[in-house]
Image (tube, rainbow, N blue to C red):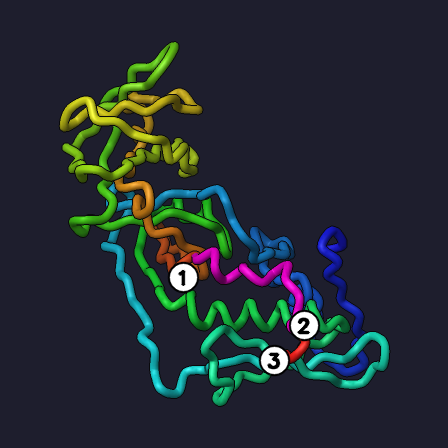
Amino acid sequence: MASRGDYFDFAVEEAGTVKDALNDALKAGFAKFTLERGRITPVRDELRTQIGKMYTPQNMTSSLKRAFTLPAPDDYDGVLIKYRDGNTWAEETVKCKLDGDAFIRVEEITLDGVTDRDRAWRYGMRQRRAQVYQTKSYSWSTELSALNSGYLSYDAVADDIPGYAQSAVMVDCSHGEGPVIVESSEPFTWEAGKTHVLAVRRPDGSVSGPWAAARLDDYRVIIPTIDFEPDLSLEIEPPHLLFGVSNRWCYPVLITSIEPGDYSADMEAVNYDARVYADDDNFAPEDA
């Protein structure tokens, strides 16, 4: 990306596939090669701010499965990036590690086309941070609404485990000037002293909100506004609701796989964690 100063400078002189060459080039900008409806579509992995689609027990055809990778003695504790310096054209290395890393069991990566030490270090730190912070995986099945998402879409998923988010269907919505009153098909559980939010699923599967929520009664919630007109005619599926405490109203994920079938689709994802991107604009320390 020219706006960030991310450049790829490499001559392909050996036989290989176009896909491999494109992936090597896109890697310099934290992007990957994908095919979307038959078209080559680069997808950049970057810091996100707005949730895309929403998947809850209301539109899942099989329960959400969660897995967590525990730390192990043979885990990597650092990343070593090999790159070719743009001034000397000599092969150089840069160490990428977090505070506390012993840098004994190291993943070595050759980064073709990146000729700047800081950018090579940033790529390595992205890899190292993903090793530490991206350790959760999710899988579920849903209807063909899964095709609204794409590779690395930033989406919200939820299950029905007590203490986490609660999902329901919108029964009524009264709004005009001022706050909006939303009626739920299920009673919501409020936690004393906590800030709660409500997210609403639009007809295209995208998320409206999350909006700050106030309790009216067990089934009715007050939110400050809503940015679309809910269709409660039952001619289409009514909006889904996702309610919870502000810091755990959903599991934020990045979609890694969508396998469509005849009438449903299997989906897989990894957890989204903003800490993965914390060094994207930082500079390599002198001792790296």
- Judge the density around disc 2: few (<14), some (14-19), many (≥20) Cα neighbours within 10 Å: many
Q: Using the image as rendered, state which of residue 222 and residue 26 is in the foreground.
A: 222
Give the amino acid type for the residue marked by disc 1 in the picture.
Val
Image coordinates of residue 239 in percent, x first then y, are 32, 30
Image: magenta residue range: 273-285
Disc 1 or 2, which lies upstream in sequence? 2
Disc 1 or 3, which lies upstream in sequence? 3
From the image, state whether disc 2 or disc 3 is nearer to you. Answer: 3
Q: Using the image as rendered, state which of residue 267 and residue 152 is in the foreground.
A: 152
Q: Residue at x 29, y 43 (%)?
A: 59
Q: Which residue is mark 2?
A: 120
Which part of the image, by quadrant, shows the C terminus? bottom right
In the image, is residue 199 above or below residue 51?
A: above
Image coordinates of residue 213 in percent, x first then y, are 29, 29
**Residue 31 seen from this side:** no
Between the residue at mark 1 and the residue at mark 3, the CA separation in whole angstroms equals: 26 Å
Give the amino acid type for the residue marked by disc 2 in the picture.
Ala
Image coordinates of residue 88 in percent, x first then y, are 85, 81
Q: Which residue is mark 3?
A: 95
In the image, is residue 284 above or below residue 14?
A: above
Q: Answer with the quarter of the image where residue 73 lies.
A: bottom left
* Disc 2 and disc 3 in contact, CB within 8 angstroms: no
Which part of the image, by quadrant, shows the N terminus? bottom right
Looking at the rendered structure, which numbered label has been put on residue 270?
A: 1
**SS class, disc 3:** strand
Give the amino acid type for the residue marked by disc 3 in the picture.
Lys
Q: Residue at x 21, y 28 (%)?
A: 184
Q: Residue at x 39, y 24 (%)?
A: 226
Left/right of residue 75 with respect to residue 284 in the rendered view: left
From the image, state whether disc 1 or disc 2 is nearer to you. Answer: 2
Disc 2 or 3, which lies upstream in sequence? 3
Asked whether 279 falls inside the magenta stretch, the response is yes
